[in-house]
Amino acid sequence: MIPPSKQNGPSFVYNLRFKKKADLRWRNNIVFPPSVSYDVPNAGVLTEWEFQVWGENQVGVGPMSPIAVAVSGQDYPPEIKNINVTKITKESIYVVWRAQHNFDGRIDGYKVRTY
């Protein structure tokens, strides 16, 4: 391990390792300063990932970060179609639509606006 006084010397790079939490095998990537980020391609929808980063230079390898856990996002849901109003009374309106299932993500709820 590199002592703090010698960290970030010549030929400094960041080592990034990451994996889907369910996987056993880590993937590795080198990030060259001044960059301090990496975009994981094909991260999947609502997939849990683990990440670790450490520095390395000509003197040696620095300490590993703790494992950071993140969940990938999802796409916006598609437009809701097949909306029908079936019952109208003086005090209520009954609205029905078909749930959407063919997209990368999940429906967390529906919001109905009235004017």
Image: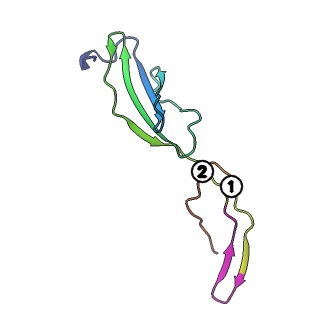
Marks 1 and 2 in Cβ contact (< 8 Å): no
Q: Which residue is mark 2?
A: 105
Q: Could you tell me which residue is drawn at 39 percent across and 16 percent down?
A: 12
Residue occupying the point 63% across, 74% down? 114
Q: Is residue 87 left or right of residue 1?
A: right
Q: Is residue 13 above or below residue 100?
A: above
Secondary structure of residue under mark 1:
loop
Q: Earlier in the sequence, mark 1 or mark 2?
A: 1
Q: Amino acid at mark 2?
A: Gly
Q: Tell whether 112 sits left or right of 33.
A: right
Q: Which residues are magenta?
A: 87-99
Residue 99: percent from the left, percent from the top? Answer: 66, 63
9 vs 81: above or below: above
Q: Nearer the viewer, residue 44 or 53?
A: 44
Name the amino acid, label 1. Answer: Pro
- Tag shown at residue 78: 1
Task: Say which quarter of the image contains residue 83.
Answer: bottom right
**Within 10 angstroms of label 2, few (less than 14), some, or many (20 or more) residues?**
some
- Does the magenta portion include 39? no
Q: Tell whether position 90 is magenta.
A: yes
